[in-house]
Amino acid sequence: MSADGLGDHAERFLTAARTHRECRGGRVVSADDSSAIVELDIDVEMPLHMRIDGVSASGVRRTETVAALLGPRYPWSPPTFFLREGFPRDLPHLQPGPLTEPPRPCLIDDNEREYFFLFGLVELGVFHLVHQLVLWLRHAAEGALIDRQQGWEPTLRRDLFADIVIDAEACRAAVDRNGGHRALKARYLRVGNADGAIGPDVFALIDVSDRQVPLSRHDDELLSHGTNGRDATGNTVCCVAWPDKLPSGKPFVAATYMPETVTTFGELLARADELGCGRSLRVFLDGLERWFHDRASKTRSPFRLPLSCVPDGPFT
């Protein structure tokens, strides 16, 4: 597609978006052969006292500027919306992503591409996506992105490049009032460059069993590694950790919602501390590292040693 062609799409996108009454302005920021960025100024409905202050209690501004990224396949694929830098991240219904990128709202429950094409015309698809964006910002301002009466909602992990298959009911049954963890036997599949981190070019799948394994036992089959070209399979171990109780004796309950922003080992430890699971996770990691050292003294291991040497490294 030529730069002019993508620029034309961006202008038509902006025209369609501005038909929504809450879209008070906008502009085409850039357009080239691979992408276009369009900014939209969205008027956010909120209670009167918040509108007077210009910002809601949750940190949403009266007018939010949202960037829409049109990729090279647009309009055959939907736009991607990015909120401003500094937009509060302690809100539910944010897509997973690193802190180095602007947050992305999750606008619909189902497939966004199917929703975009549901209305027949591209302009209608744009209008309805913008309407979902308007509703999302309104609910974010009111603190109503999730229905508290329905209870807990899991953190979104859509579009990530690693999947874990595990029995959630069995995990919940293992949790008690005291902090702890379980090490479970698992199988893994890793597809992609052997030297790359998990991401667009590397995918990982971990299938966790209900078999608990003691790391004190020197079982050479506990961790194994085999390759077939660019793919790797083998045995591994998965940790299920739960938080310590508070000094008052009450169970730990996270005070705020935490979207998935973990991309490095160091960030994983920090998130575990935030969730009260840091001690339990470190006990597991210490046991795993001892297992590695004991095994490495007897036979060559295909895994990187030791874990403590890469606290800020990406997941591989």
Image: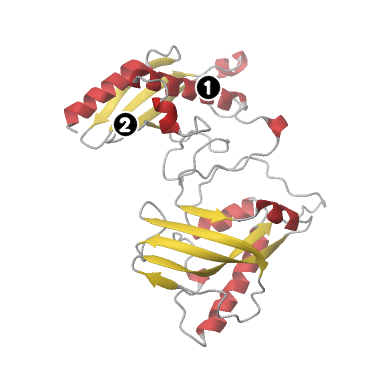
Q: Which amino acid, by three-letter code, is at mark 1? A: Leu
Q: Where is residue 300 in the image (x, y as percent from the top left)?
A: 45, 83
Q: Is residue 259 visible?
A: yes
Q: Which amino acid, by three-letter code, is at mark 2? A: Trp
Sort mark 2 into few (<14), some (14-19) or many (20+) by Cα contacts within 10 Å.
few
Number of marks = 2
Name the residue at 17% across, 27% down.
Answer: 4
- Quadrant occupied by the N terminus: top left
Residue placed furthest toward the bottom:
298
Q: Mark 2 points at which residue?
A: 76
Q: Can residue 83 be seen in this view?
A: no
Q: Which of marks 1 and 2 is nearer the N terminus?
A: 2
Q: In this rendering, is residue 167 above or below 10? A: below
From mark 1 to mark 2, how far is it between C-alphas? 24 Å
Q: In this view, does 255 lie to the left or right of 81?
A: right
Front in this rendered view, residue 2 or 309: 2
Q: Position of residue 275 (x, y in %)?
A: 65, 51
Front in this rendered view, residue 243 or 73: 73
Residue placed furthest toward the right:
249
Task: Determine which quarter of the picture holds residue 121.
Answer: top left
**Mark whose residue sits in front, 1 or 2:** 2
Q: Mark 1 points at which residue?
A: 135
Sort mark 1 into few (<14), some (14-19) or many (20+) by Cα contacts within 10 Å.
some
Q: Where is residue 236 in the image (x, y as percent from the top left)?
A: 54, 68
Name the residue at 66% across, 56% down.
Answer: 277
Question: Of helix, strand and loop, which one carries label 2?
Answer: loop
Q: Are marks 1 and 2 in contact (CB under 8 Å)?
A: no
Question: Of helix, strand and loop, which one carries label 1?
Answer: helix
Q: Where is residue 164 in the image (x, y as percent from the top left)?
A: 54, 55
- Quadrant occupied by the C terminus: bottom left
Name the residue at 58% across, 78% down.
Answer: 291
